[in-house]
Image (cartoon, rainbow, N blue to C red):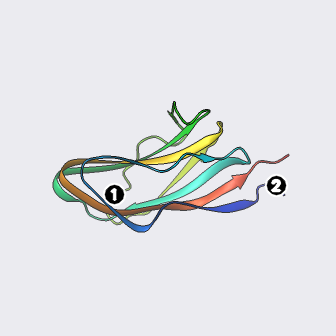
Amino acid sequence: MAGKRFPLVLVPRYSTYAGAGDFTTIGMEVTPFVSALVTIWRNSLNGTSPTCTFEFEESTDRTVWTTCSGGGAVDPGTDTEHLVSVELKKRYFRSRVKLGGTGVAASLYAVGYFTARTH
């Protein structure tokens, strides 16, 4: 069926991450899909000089990762949902949350759907 959509949960509602660093999801097989539409959200950040960005990456081998088209670093802002549309061109897909600052902590989510390729 052309353009059929399938649910996607990268980071469940309301996951909490703490400490500066990168938090990545597992690389999932996405060859049946042409794109992902992801809603991202975060609360107000705690800590000193805190930062938070979401990134979306793809890979052919789950070793070397590149940014998806449309998936550059995005901070949705405090308590604001932001919609990100990424094009899937490689076999694997994952998300990355980057937290920066001292004593940083955030509750957040990344959910949406995949769109199937047409054959």
Q: Nearer the viewer, residue 6 or 2?
A: 6
Dividing the image into 4 quarters, which one contains the N terminus? bottom right
Give the residue pinned by disc 1. 77
Q: What kind of element bears circle 2?
A: loop
- The structure residue drawn at horizontal position 55% and vertical position 36%, both measured from the top left corner, is 62
Q: Most extreme residue toward the top, as rendered?
A: 64
Tell me if mark 1 has few (under 14), some (14-19) or many (20+) residues whose alpha carbon lies within 10 angstroms of its own: some
Q: Earlier in the sequence, mark 1 or mark 2?
A: 2
Residue 9 relative to residue 5: left or right: left
Q: State the image coordinates of residue 112 (x, y, percent, origin top left).
A: 57, 61
Q: Is residue 6 left or right of residue 76?
A: right
Residues under labels 1 and 2: Cα distance? 34 Å
Q: Nearer the viewer, residue 85 or 98?
A: 98
Give the SS element for disc 1: loop
Q: Relative to 64, is 112 above or below? A: below
Callout 2, which amino acid? Ala
Q: Looking at the image, which residue is at 38% across and 63% down? A: 108
Residue shown at 21% from the left, 55% from the top:
104
Of the two numbered discs 1 and 2 in the rendering, the one whose residue sits closer to the viewer? 2
Q: Quadrant of residue 2?
A: bottom right
Residue carrying label 2:
2
